[in-house]
Image: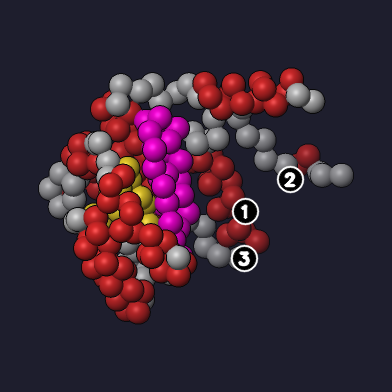
């Protein structure tokens, strides 16, 4: 039996993609407590993320600008062991918010299979987007650069996203925040309502009737 005093109750009514901030906050606190680590000041990071938006459109492409570049193309978000989860969420956010195709892959695994098929993706107007990290090793950086060379031979110029940050958590949250806004900009361009998920609900309805 779980002691009610040690149970965290989450607010209801949120779609899973919108509940990420709540879920992440609870899980991070739990892990830091169990591991005996100093707790991350998420409020301070939140303020930093708002301040960093001033660099979007100056030092970095603004989400709206990148959305226009991706419009009419299929994003392929490519992560590494540092950014693989962000690449997966990016794919999901574009799928659900913009109601548009997007894919993700992870290095170095993609170098063992996907790279052999890359020439066939040109006709599908696939746009590689590499999610870079300040924590990537020199060897990993060389792998990403080499992969970029091969992808550009088949698909044209690749996009590389990276952000300045004072910690890994800040970096991950900043990139996630940016890509979430990017997915909303793509939704606007595609005249899509980000909130409803009609096909998902339809699927659940079909499955429930088959029980």
- Give the label on residue 30, or none: 1
| Mark with earlier residue (2, 3) | 2
* Location of the N terminus (image quadrant): top right
Task: Locate residue 161: give its quadrant.
Answer: bottom left
Q: Which residue is rendered at x = 30% and y = 33% of the image? A: 186
Residue stretch in magenta: 80-106
Measured from the top left, where is residue 55 in percent x and y?
18, 48
Task: Locate residue 145: give its quadrant.
Answer: bottom left
- Give the label on residue 6, or none: 2
Q: Which residue is rendered at x = 56% and y = 42% of the image? A: 23
| Magenta stretch encompasses residue 137 | no
What colour scheme does the image use?
secondary structure
Q: Is residue 19 left or right of residue 160?
A: right
Residue with the mark numbered 3: 35
Measured from the top left, where is residue 146 in percent x and y?
28, 72
Q: Residues within 10 Å of mark 1 (few under 14, many from 20)?
A: few
Disc 3 element: loop
């Amino acid at each position: 039996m779980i002691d009610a005093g040690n149970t965290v109750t989450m607010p209801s009514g949120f779609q899973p993609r919108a509940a990420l901030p709540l879920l992440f906050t609870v899980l991070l606190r739990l892990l830091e407590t169990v591991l005996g680590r100093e707790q991350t000041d998420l409020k301070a990071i939140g303020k930093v993320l708002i301040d960093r938006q001033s660099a979007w459109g100056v030092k970095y492409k603004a989400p709206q600008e990148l959305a226009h570049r991706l419009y009419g193309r299929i994003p392929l978000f490519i992560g590494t062991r540092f950014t693989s989860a962000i690449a997966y969420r990016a794919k999901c956010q574009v799928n659900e918010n913009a109601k548009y195709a997007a894919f993700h892959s992870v290095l170095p695994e993609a170098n063992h299979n996907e790279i052999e098929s890359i020439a066939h993706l040109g006709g599908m107007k696939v746009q590689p987007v590499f999610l870079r990290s300040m924590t990537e090793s020199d060897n990993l950086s060389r792998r990403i650069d080499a992969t970029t060379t091969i992808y550009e031979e088949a698909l044209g110029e690749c996009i590389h996203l990276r952000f300045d940050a004072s910690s890994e958590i800040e970096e991950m949250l900043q990139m996630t925040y940016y890509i979430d806004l990017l997915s909303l900009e793509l939704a606007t361009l595609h005249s899509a309502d980000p909130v409803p998920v009609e096909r998902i609900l339809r699927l659940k309805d079909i499955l429930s009737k088959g029980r």
